[in-house]
Amino acid sequence: MLGWIDTLLQGILLGGLYSLYATGLSVIFGIMRLVNLAHGDLIVLAAFLILAATSVGVPLVAALAVVVPLMFALGYVLQSVLLNRALGRNILPPLLITFGLSIIIQNGLLETFSADTRFLNVGPLQGASLPLGGGIAVGVMPLICLAAAIAVILVLNGVFYRTAVGRAFRATSDDVEIAQLMGINNRSIYALTMGIALAVCAVAGFFLGARANFDPSIGPARLLYAFEAVIIGGLGSLWGTLAGGVVVGVAQTVGAHIDPEWQILSGHVAFLIVLVIRPRGLFPRAVD
Amino acid sequence: MVTSEVIVQAKSSGQRPRFAVTRATRASTVALVLAIPAIVALIVLPAFAGRVLLQELFYVFTMLVLAQLWNLLAGSAGLISVGQQAFVGLGAYALFAFTVIGGLDPVLAIALSGAVAGLLAIPAALIVFRLRGAYFAIGTWVVAEVCRLVLAQVKQLGGGTGTSLPPYIASSMVGLDYVRDLFGVRGPVARDIMSYWLALMLALGTFLMVYRLLRSRYGLALSAIGDSEAAAESTGVDVFRTKLLIYVLTAVATGMVGALIFLQKARISPDAAFSLVDFTAYVIFIVVIGGIGTMEGPIIGVAIFYLLQYYLAALGSWYLILLGALAILLMLFAPTGVWGLISHSSGISLFPVRRRLIVLGTDEKETKR
């Protein structure tokens, strides 16, 4: 019984990480109906950028503080130079452009950093845990990660619901033509959106490297977890995405508890089950 | 003269134009005439060609089949899948199961493997069809991952590390002795010739199937669905059934190709059989560079891809970076691909699937009732 409680707890904490993966994807889809197939690779890219900064002596937290605006700028440029050219009713061009990007990033990282497994050294926090009594303990790093996931959603919701530019975001999301009539430049909104999404990717990359090992090839799997979290949560809200991340995380730890080889598989199966039972996710938006 | 000009001219001179709906063009007639000797040459090629050329052509044909099938899904039906490696892998594993465990003949096993892939495509379709557009794409990818992870659990087929096909299986292939005697070659060469013929057969069969399908009423239904599902539904197209038919049909053929590829490789592992890069990324690249949504595109695309692969594959990851960059540039500046550029500037269509209105001539207008 205690083992199951522990499994559930670890799953919820893992869900925090998956929610960080998924939040950027959710924002991009919510505002511009775009699916970024390079999303997972961008998270891994951020982790490598942080690693590179620390390897030249920058403290870890300062490295994160540098990489977040860097990834924001990358997203802004990516959207305005590449993806804005491929907007339109046909979904193939943006899909294939991001697919090409995914392959470029993966192989570029492979050339630059080799296929070696890396991790971000978080010092004494590495492996630190809080005992909760009864033999159950939670890792400090996973706990911080879940807190960060919640904080990111709070900040983004603050931007979207309490600022003028947030109103422009929501207007563009609701109806891009009407938003344009109201004087909103949808292309610059899209560029900002991609910037925000990649800034969140930087945070996700930090916790990816702080919680586990990474190498250039693991991006696509992160994309799939993120995607599953978004769909399970429904396209309604970022809190839904957090819930979706927790569902994937719990499904994975429960699967791993039964047989370590089933971890990834049971996450995917949980996603397919939700898709069959509730195709619009747990917290769907009224109109898509 | 343009059709509309004929109409105007005929009307002004009191005549009535006669029309016909056709798909044939002069270029398509020429293509048809030239195709027959080309096919015959390819069939008798093993009598002249060396083993290496046959192996290279085997690769080209299998990639061509995968490209034609992906093109049918994405270019015609708007079903953009990045999970076709699911059916390559399922077909391949079914072949190993039928031959190693079931003791069946490999050629029969290829056909059965296609059927297995097709059967499994039905539940897969029922799930992924709940997703639209770009989300459909990632959904198919998840399905492929599930297949990979499940087969990695099957210990009888080598689990996560994979297994090899015992040599006696490939050498027991039906017709192999006949080929050996016909060409006077050793067993392994005869196997390559058989594989080459099977790949050629699959390539021709797939091409004909897709061509005929696109020229049938299903082709019209598909292009309607590709344009707008709601509009297609409202004009009486059964959108779900049509999409399901195409999805299952491509799964059957993809499964057969997968079985053939891994019969030739004689070694299988989950990572190789469900490889995203080998069976989806390359295939998408071929279709996009050749020209999506046309019959000619995949043929040109596979030729370009083969040349790039031949000269640049030694660059390793730089080669893949180059392919990715090329695909992006193409999407931005020439989304219709090489064939799109050619046919746009010359108006040529070798394998036309589009219906055109042509003027046969003009009649005297009847004045009496």
Image (tube, helix red, strand yellow):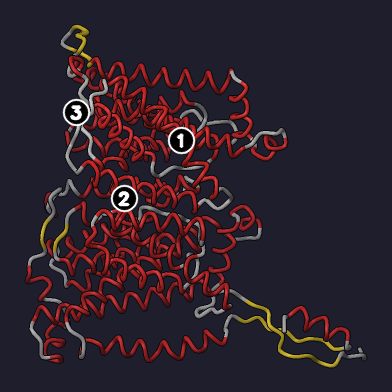
Q: Position of residue B93 (x, y in %)?
A: 21, 59
**Going from the N terminus, do you reach mark 3 or mark 1 first?**
3
Image coordinates of residue A271 in percent, x first then y, are: 36, 37
Tell me which chain the residue with mark 1 is part of: A
What is the CA distance from the residue labelled 1 to the residue labelled 2? 21 Å
Q: Nearer the viewer, mark 3 or mark 1?
A: 3
- Circles 1 and 2: CB atoms closer than 8 Å: no
Instruction: From the top left corner, tell me how far across and down residue A233 is, in percent.
Output: 44, 30
Decide: is A54 above or below A42.
above
Secondary structure beneath dot 1 equals loop
Along the line of sight, which residue is nearer the eye, B355 or B294? B294
Quarter of the image containing the N terminus of chain B?
Answer: bottom right
Looking at the image, can residue A19 be seen? no
Numbered disc 2: what chain? B
Q: State the mark number for residue B228.
A: none
Q: Position of residue A44 (x, y in %)?
A: 30, 36
**Chain letter of the residue carrying label 3:** A
Residue that mark 1 sits on: A278
The residue wearing badge 2 is: B144
Q: Residues within 10 Å of mark 1 (few under 14, many from 20)?
A: some
The reply to the same-chain question for discs 1 and 2 is no
Q: Dot 3 corresponds to which residue?
A: A257
C-alpha span from label 2 to label 3: 24 Å
